[in-house]
Amino acid sequence: MAWSSLPFVVLFALAVSAQLGASDLAPDYYSDTCPNLETIGCDGSVLISSTAGSAAERDADDNKSLAFEGFDTVNAAKVAVEAACPDLVSCADILTIATRDAISMSGGPFYPVELGRLDGLSSSASSVPGLLPRPTHTINQLIAIFRAHGLTTSHMVALSAAHTVGLAHCGTFRDRVYGNPADPTLNPTYAAFLRTKCPADGSSDPMVLMDQSSPATFDNQYFRNLQDGGGLLASDQVLYTDSRTRTNVNALANSTAAFNSAFVDAITKLGRVGVKSGSQGNIRQQCDVFN
């Protein structure tokens, strides 16, 4: 993925297989075995490092912008958890908690996370293409990707708010700014600003904040930006230009409470996708290396 919005992107990168064992998840899964888990502070396959001759998921083209600081944070959390509760808590669950905490610490909602996942037994860059939304996807392509994981159009719109934080490389939206003609759905003033940040010839590929209004805050400003033609990626702005999703965008733009509720519902359902249980997974002792 050529943009960086770690909480949503990492979780979606984990949701790449059929739904397994999601009914076994529970917020209090570790209440007896590791009661202080969340104060110590999805299939963790995206955390695995590549080895010679074997490219892991984190090095797939769609994941190359994921911040290494994020991986390091999860690995450090795993070390602390192992010290307190050895061989009990999966990297996938730690990642899920870290995602929630990153959202909350950025001003977004705090919500109970369902726990009880196992870590995946494989990680391959070749498994990623076609499973993640891309910045040039049409609304039909976006809907199809989310639907394939059991998520509705409403879930898709709510989860897209992850783009209220993070950055995107100029290459992911350059055609919108310099195309012949330029994208008519892009606010002209915003387009002029983007031209000051991104060279037309592609001689460099700097990154631009996805939300210029409140870049460090996880809020519903993302949807208000769309109402003003300020979606950075084509796949952002299409949520407003298409009548099938415009009503959802307007509702979430107009109410922080509605946005928080919709986002929590959507990310909870996302967290149930691709869950590993039984012989389909294990508990990794180190998040970036298979046992």
Image (spheres, rainbow, N blue to C red):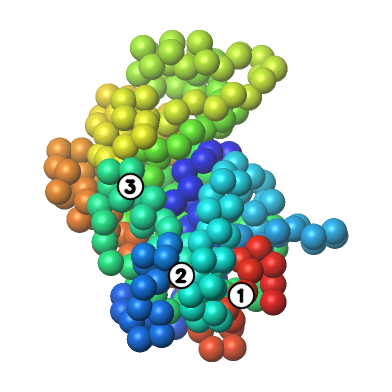
- From the top left corner, tell me how far across and down residue 62 is, in percent: 61, 47
Judged left or right of residue 263, residue 65 is: right
Secondary structure, mark 2, is helix
Amino acid type at circle 1 is Arg
Crowding around mark 1 (Cα neighbors within 10 Å: few <14, some 14 to 19, many 20+) is: many
- From the top left corner, tell me how far across and down residue 25 is, in percent: 37, 79
Secondary structure, mark 3, is helix
CA gap between label 3 and label 2 equals 18 Å
Crowding around mark 2 (Cα neighbors within 10 Å: few <14, some 14 to 19, many 20+) is: many
Per the image, the residue denoted by label 1 is: 284
Secondary structure, mark 1, is loop
Residue depicted at 36% across the width and 73% down the height: 36
Q: Quadrant of the N terminus?
A: top right
Which sits in the foreground, 41 or 223?
41
Tell me the mark number nearer the camera, choosing from 3 and 2: 3
CA gap between label 3 and label 1 equals 27 Å
Q: Quadrant of the C terminus?
A: bottom right
Residue depicted at 58% across the width and 52% down the height: 72
Amino acid type at circle 2 is Asp
Image height of 86 relative to 127, above or below: below
Which sits in the foreground, 138 or 161?
161
Residue depicted at 31% across the width and 25% down the height: 213
Tag 3 near tag 1, CB within 8 Å: no
Residue extending farthest bottom: 278
Judged left or right of residue 5, residue 125 is: right
Crowding around mark 3 (Cα neighbors within 10 Å: few <14, some 14 to 19, many 20+) is: some
Residue extending farthest front: 83
Q: Give the mark, 3 or 2, whose residue is nearer the N terminus.
A: 2
Image height of 15 relative to 103, above or below: below
Per the image, the residue denoted by label 2 is: 93
Per the image, the residue denoted by label 3 is: 105
Q: Give the mark, 3 or 1, whose residue is nearer the N terminus.
A: 3
